[in-house]
Amino acid sequence: MSIAEIIALLAFTAATVFGCAGIAGLFLKKDAYSRVQFGALTSTTSVLSLFIGLIFLSPSVGFIARIAVIIAFFLISSPTASYIVTRLLWQSDSSG
Amino acid sequence: MTQTLLIWAQYLLLFFAVASAVKILIGPTGADRLIALMILSSVTLGFLVLTAVEKERLIYLDVALVYDIFGFLGLLAIARFLPRSLMRSQEKDTGKPVRRKNEHS
């Protein structure tokens, strides 16, 4: 087992923990804002951990560069989407 | 070992996709469905990148980037038109008009 595979294994484990916690919170939490929080945990942190693991398993530099571009855009778009959903929830006053 | 890791990640993403699809179906509010849709969009993006690395095909990464951009734009469009339907359902439940919190009287 190489160093890259060990780092990928750690990143995938983090993705599993974050993702399962987020899905569990999405179904179990009563408050709507908490559900948004846990949904953002799955959609942002879990997928980002997966991308970091995939960088270490990439076969060439071209893959790493493209995945880095995807991560850069994902780091902007995903938290913004979570913010939009939260603002929508606040404005429509449907948190109960 | 690399193949084992990639297959593990595929099953993980499949589980997240199924769970968020169930949440889209059961709701109960529009905001819940929007959150689940956001998760499903991110999981699909992750699956595309995973497939690109597994099959060693660069084209999947370009598809993933375009999918991410259009997924974000789609979410913006849904969020633009969802508040009306949310308020309408609230008005139906409570019987009185719902006003936005930042609106002045």
Image (cartoon, coloured by chain):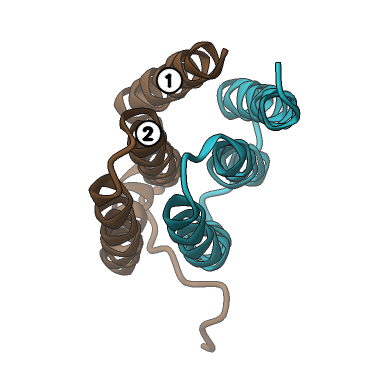
The amino acid on which the numbered mark 1 sits, given as a three-letter code, is: Gln
**Cβ–Cβ below 8 Å for labels 1 and 2?**
yes
Residue B86 shows which numbered tag? none
Would you name the residue on which mark 2 appears? B47
Image vertical order of residue A56 relative to residue B12, above or below? below
* Towards the viewer: A71 or B55: B55
On screen, residue A90 versus residue A14, left or right, reads left
The residue at 57%/25% (across/down) is A23
Chain A colour as displayed: cyan
Residue A96 can be seen in this image: no
Establish whether labels 1 and 2 are both on one chain: yes
Q: Quadrant of residue B66?
A: bottom left
* Towards the viewer: B74 or A53: A53
Callout 1: SS: helix
- Name the spot of residue A18 as percent of width and height, x first: 69, 30
- Label 1 vs 2, first from the N-terminus: 1
Chain coloured brown in this rendering: B
The amino acid on which the numbered mark 2 sits, given as a three-letter code, is: Phe
Would you name the residue on which mark 1 appears? B10
Question: Chain ID for label 1?
Answer: B
Image vertical order of residue A88 relative to residue A34, above or below? below
Callout 2: SS: helix
Task: Report crowding for label 2: few under 14, some 14 to 19, many 20 or more residues within 10 A (C-alpha).
Answer: many
Which quadrant does the N terminus of chain A fall into? top right
- Name the spot of residue B55 as percent of width and height, x first: 31, 30
Q: CA distance from mark 1 to mark 2?
A: 7 Å
Task: Report crowding for label 1: few under 14, some 14 to 19, many 20 or more residues within 10 A (C-alpha).
Answer: some
